[in-house]
Amino acid sequence: MKRNSEKYILTDNMEWEELGGGVSRKMLGYDNQIMMVLVKFEKGAEGTPHQHFHTQATYCAKGKFEFEIDGHKQVIKAGDGVYMEPNLLHSAVCLEEGILIDTFSPVREDFLDGSGVSYFGNKED
């Protein structure tokens, strides 16, 4: 079944989806193979350690973050990128208020159906 977002995603017309813990997001575009998500972090907000079978590439559009991927830490700033292979444990701490652009392949079904928010594990936790 073919499924996709609108061709143009105008963020001024969208509300931030509050995820809790100082993190919110906007879905920027997706189909069955790829998804792009705008994620806003308040200073000190954390994406707790998690892993998923999706390949993830992240662009830091604003701020500064300390990422940990598979036990290795690195501070990134606006203009830097991060690549996460499938199933690697990873996390992030926002050091300066910031915005990340996360890209996933394949699409994050859990983001679309609301069954989980990987930034914090299950919503029920």
Image (cartoon, helix red, strand yellow):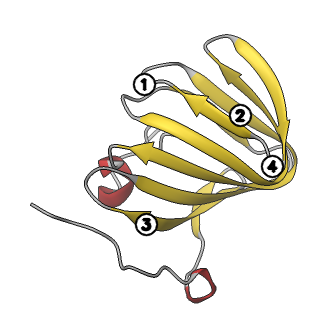
Residue found 51% across the figure and 48% down from its top: 103
Which is in the foreground here, disc 2 or disc 1?
1
Residue found 43% across the figure and 39% down from its top: 122
Visible residue check, residue 42: no
Instruction: Please give the residue where the numbered disc 1 appears in the rendered image.
Output: 86
Residue 42 falls in image quadrant: bottom right
- Distance, label 2 to label 1, CA atoms, is 16 Å
SS label for mark 4:
loop
- The residue lying toward the viewer, choosing from 53 and 47, is 53
Question: Considering only order in the chain, which callout, 2 or 3, is on the residue closer to the N terminus?
Answer: 3
Three-letter code, disc 3: Gly
Residue found 67% across the figure and 10% down from its top: 71
Q: Position of residue 8 (x, y in %)?
A: 45, 82
Q: Residues within 10 Å of mark 4 (few under 14, many from 20)?
A: few
Residue 84 falls in image quadrant: top right
- Distance, label 3 to label 2, CA atoms, is 23 Å
Task: Residue 29: give its label.
Answer: 3
Q: Is residue 117 left or right of residue 43?
A: left
Residue found 44% across the figure and 33% down from its top: 55
Three-letter code, disc 2: Ala
Task: Residue 79: give its label.
Answer: 4
SS label for mark 2:
strand
Question: Considering only order in the chain, which callout, 4 or 3, is on the residue closer to the N terminus?
Answer: 3
Tell me whether the residue at label 1 lies in contact with that at label 4, contact meaning CB atoms closer than 8 angstroms: no
Q: Is residue 9 above or below residue 117?
A: below
